[in-house]
Image (tube, helix red, strand yellow):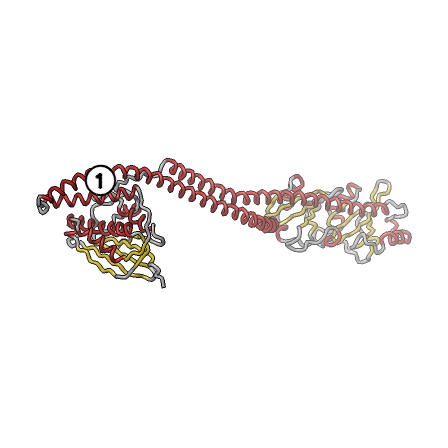
Amino acid sequence: MSPPPAHPSLTSLVPPPGELLRTQRKAGRSAVVGLMLLWGAAFVSPFVTYQADVKAAEGELLVHLSDRAGLQAQALGAHLGLLRAELQRLAEHPALKPEDGAAGPEVALLENAFGHTSLFSAGVALLSADGQRIWSDPETMSLGRTPLPTRPWFRRMMERRAASVGLLDDEGGGLVAVAVPIVRDERVVGLLVGELATASELLPPHRGTNESLVALLGERDRLLLPATPPPLLRQPELAARLRPLVEEPGAITLGGTRLLGAAALVPGTGMLLAVLEDEARDRALLKRRYLGQFGIHTALLGGVLLLFTLLLRRSYHSLMTAEEQLRRQETMAALGTASSLIAHEVKNALNSMQAALSMIRAKGGETTLPVQALRSQADRLGHLARSLLSFASPQSTQRRSCEMHLLVQDALQAVKLLPEAADVTVETTLQEGLFVKGDPTLLVSAVDNLIRNAVEAGAVAHDTGQQPTPRVQVQLLREGAEVVLVVEDNAGGVPLAFEPRLWEPFAVGRSKGIGLGLPMVRTAIRAHDGGSVSYTRVSGGSRFTVRLPLEKMAS
């Protein structure tokens, strides 16, 4: 069955939340938005800081690589300068005459100077002007696989009559040659050549992916070191890509690997020394370090913000509750004043009606239909006046032992006198012997209002054709340590839109009533310690349940 028609506008004398409440809600929304922005900033800020730190760390790494490349280039230049100076010292000795061949004085001079020397790990040799071996230590010292006059460093030395450094043999071998010409009468008559095993003499070896990669390029941009280069250094135009690092250290990509590098020129030579770092490896190290800091920072900041959020939420809800309570108190005070004035006016009119009815009864006209209708309306007005006065000036609770069965019977007797009761069947199941400690007047009023509302709802449903057999069931029983009163009807139930306002004063969901019955019921029941009243929508109707603590009988 469809529910009875509701009041068109579900009007209520209770005003909506005031301007202050709306302002508070607006401020609350602004606070939430601000808090969300603060949360975002709290998590974005460490990330931006992390990015800035990574960039700063990369800048510091480039400075470190630049300093390292410069220092190693200076050290290598000084080392090669020492080797040239040692060879130059002997080349200028007047007793050294390559044109005499391996004569006794020359051999003795060379062996005294370079025999088993640690300066040149691969050996030292005295050569003629056409590149022929005159003397060497060791005797099996390699001079390369191609004729010496074809070597770039040999030709450069002969043309410039100046010391030269370069690969011993362009075809391989991994040896670096330091050559010094022997000049007599402005003519090159021979040369001294010292050979170095590049992998162990000039620079430290490359020890895998966890070490910096050092590259040394010589004449014609040939890679001198490392002797066995990794794949990423076997790139075309390697020198053209490394030389810009001399002026501006930075990132380059070799063999698909992004590297950070710096380079420097080796003083006194045409060599280029570059120091390279794997950017991904360095970034991973930085990332692990800064992500740890980021995690700690985020956890601390997140905890503070979470606590702030909870406190703000609690404060906001407390403010909303206080505002709502204040609004209700002000509203109830205003409604109480108005109710008192209305009730007194109704009582004055009602007294006149009661006097007129007394005169009619004295003349024996009480049985006529108009008189019965007048008595019914007088009773309704009396109930209205009592409700208004009770709402305006709540009675103080007078506690005594009450048997609920008798209180419910009193309420039922009063409801049966209503005209609407003729169309509604009231079924009762009342358990006797259930006592509560309470105010009988308040309890009877609460029960009367519940049963009266159910009967009136059933009568409306019958009059509108929505329920041909309206029925109200009243049950009184015991559940544990509680007395439970259940009033259930089949009149269609409270309109869904009205349920949130069910307990508001003067809020009505049907054409009859002024909306004070249920608020008075709740007030009366809650005035008893442990008392409660609740509403439940059931199939085809409504169910109201009152719970009161059972009186503890003295043993």
Q: To which quarter of the image does residue 473 belong?
A: bottom left
Residue 64 visible in the current orientation: yes
Task: Return the x and y of residue 472 as percentages of the image width and height.
Answer: 21, 55
Which residue in the rendered view is the most extreme toward the bottom?
555
* Residue sitting at the far front: 362
Count the marks. Answer: 1
Q: Is residue 250 or residue 150 the one in the foreground?
A: 250
Taking depth in this image into account, of 151 and 542 the one nearest to the observer is 542
Task: Determine whether, in the image, residue 230 is placed left or right of residue 147.
Answer: left
**For the C terminus, which image quadrant?**
bottom left
Establish if 429 lies above or below 463. below
Judge by depth and name the residue closer to the eye, 181 or 246: 246
Residue farthest top in this picture: 19
Relative to 196, 490 lies left or right: left
**Location of residue 109 in the rendering, given as x and y in whole percent from the top left corner:** 89, 51
For mark 1, what is the residue?
Answer: 347
In percent of width and height, residue 210 lies at 65, 54
Query: In the image, residue 254 lies at what x, y percent?
Result: 60, 48
Quick one: 524 or 165, which is closer to the camera? 524
Whether residue 540 is visible to the viewer of this picture, yes or no, is no
Residue 18 occupies which quadrant of the picture? Answer: top left
Occupied quadrant, residue 489: bottom left
| Residue at the (8%, 43%) spot, across then down | 363
Label 1 crowd bin: few (<14), some (14–19), many (20+), radius 10 Å: some
Say what secondary structure mark 1 lies in: helix
**Which residue type does callout 1 highlight?**
Lys
